[in-house]
Image: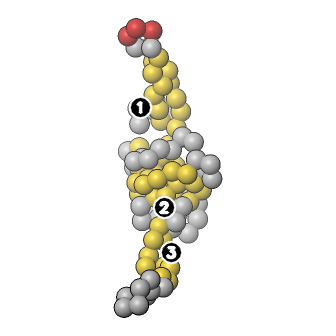
Amino acid sequence: MKIKKGDNVIVIAGKDKGKTGAVLRTFPNAQQVLVDGINRVTRHQKNRRSRSQGQVIEKNMPVHVSNVACVLDGKPVRVGYKIEDSKKDKKNKIRIARPSGKNI
């Protein structure tokens, strides 16, 4: 999965198309990401103790990774990789934006 925690993404398909947010968590096995403020749903929560009240809460639900794209300079970009040589024969794998080649 090329989208990581902390990336700014834009939704490119679905009910929240055009909205942006930061990735809070990734679920690699399910190919989904949890984005702040995207795909919000309401859930009814029962009372857990005898004197507490039930409540209606809003929470974010995961979105499939194919429905979001990384944002660079306000535009959606595809993510690629570039391998750079560093000192002592180590190679670093760096994420770049495909059209421009800028580091993400």
Amino acid bearing label 2: Gly
Tell me the residue at 42%/54% (across/down). 24
Instruction: Tell me, yes or no, if residue 27 can be seen here.
Output: yes
- Secondary structure under badge 3? strand
Q: Which mark is residue 75?
A: none
Q: Which mark is residue 102?
A: 1
The quadrant of the rendering that contains the C terminus is top left
Depth check, mark 3 against mark 1: the one in front is 3
The residue carrying mark 3 is 41
The quadrant of the rendering that contains the N terminus is top right
Residue 62 image position (x, y, % from top left): 54, 61
Amino acid bearing label 1: Lys
Q: Earlier in the sequence, mark 3 or mark 1?
A: 3
- Secondary structure under badge 1? loop
Nearer to me, 95 or 44: 44
Color style of the picture: secondary structure
Nearer to me, 87 or 96: 87
Between marks 2 and 3, how big is the CA–CA gap?
Answer: 18 Å
Neighbor class of circle 1 (other Cα within 10 Å; few <14, some 14-19, many 20+) is few
The residue carrying mark 2 is 18
Tell me the residue at 50%/79% (across/down). 43
Amino acid bearing label 3: Val
Image: 44 above or below 12: below
Q: Quadrant of residue 102?
A: top left
Between marks 1 and 2, how big is the CA–CA gap?
Answer: 23 Å
Left or right: 39 as drawn, with respect to 6: right
Q: Quadrant of residue 88?
A: top left
Tell me the residue at 52%/66% (across/down). 61
Residue 45 image position (x, y, % from top left): 48, 82
